[in-house]
Image (cartoon, coloured by chain):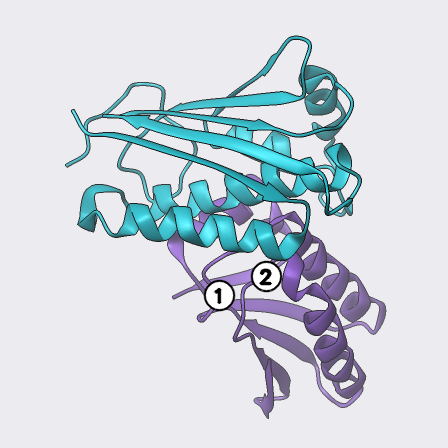
Chain colours: A cyan, B purple
Amino acid sequence: MVIYNIEGRFESTFEEVDRQVQAIISRLKAEGDQYSAGFLFQLDFVLRELFNNAIEHGNQMEPSKSVWYTLQIRGTDMELWVRDEGKDFDVDQELQQEYQDDVFRIRKRGLATIAAMGFQINRRSGCTCVRLMKKIDDTNGEGGSQSGHKLS
Amino acid sequence: MDISYRDNAVVCTVKINLIATNMKQLVEEMKAALAALTDYSSLVIDLAHTESIDSLGVTFLIGTYKEALAQGKKVKLTGVSEAMFQLFKMMKLDEIFEITTA
């Protein structure tokens, strides 16, 4: 079983978000064709959403505040933790607000999209941690599968 | 972003990712395209060189669509990767944009 554990901390700027995401995706791409283009695209989107949310809503764009993350991949199981220095929030409530049927809405679509991709979204009680879990499958960016297909 | 004109359309070839760090540049450059749109029937946004997108990138596309619509113009997305197309479908963007995959 292949195990990757990628951890990091960064200051609250969009430039740092981009740098961290590129570093993570580059590292996984370096593993050859182990991860499909669809999965890597989804992961790129998910990382940007959670990191942007953390610096924007959690840390209020204060560069001196930090975001911590841990991405762990064990075989076909992926788990991502993101923590910021903001106030606690209710993931379920956020998701409900995002489940609007207005395609023209300007914001509030990231978490619902992540859920539609098949990621389970949880929050650790008492801190501003978001936990994502997903079975990595071999789709090309389609909605999530919970069946845990092995990578080809 | 390169702006060209063909088949009665303003064609914007996006050369960077549709992400937060690039928003200011993208918005500025799209202003020129939208200003030129008056003399054309549609706006084509070519995303063949775009690998990453975030919510702000989606907001940028929707905002551009609204501005073009206000002029009575259509907006088409071309060169969209299969993975990005699946994302757009999840967001129901395929209901408002005509999308051509790469």
Whether discs 1 and 2 lie on one chain: the answer is yes
Task: Name which residue type carries label 1.
Answer: Thr
Foreground: A26 or B56? A26
Residue A61 falls left or right of residue A5: right
Tell which subunit mark 1 falls on: B
First in sequence: mark 1 vs mark 2: 2
Task: Name which residue type carries label 2.
Answer: Leu
Residue B83 falls left or right of residue A57: left
Helix, strand or loop at label 1? It is: loop
Please give the residue where the numbered disc 1 appears in the rendered image.
B50
Q: Which mark is residue B18?
A: 2
* Contact (Cβ within 8 Å) of mark 1 with mark 2: yes
Tell which subunit mark 2 falls on: B
Q: Quadrant of residue A123?
A: top right
Percent position of residue B6, x then y: 57, 90
Residue A24 falls left or right of residue A61: left
Foreground: A25 or B33? A25
Residue at the image point whose x is 62% and y is 36% from the top: A67
| Crowd band around label 1 with a 10 angstrom C-alpha radius: few (<14), some (14–19), many (20+) | some
The vertical placement of A134 against B48, above or below, is above
* Quarter in which the C terminus of chain A is drawn: top left
Q: Quadrant of residue A15?
A: bottom right
The vertical placement of A105 against B3, above or below, is above
Foreground: A63 or A105? A63
Residue at the image point whose x is 74% and y is 66% from the top: B64
Helix, strand or loop at label 2? It is: loop
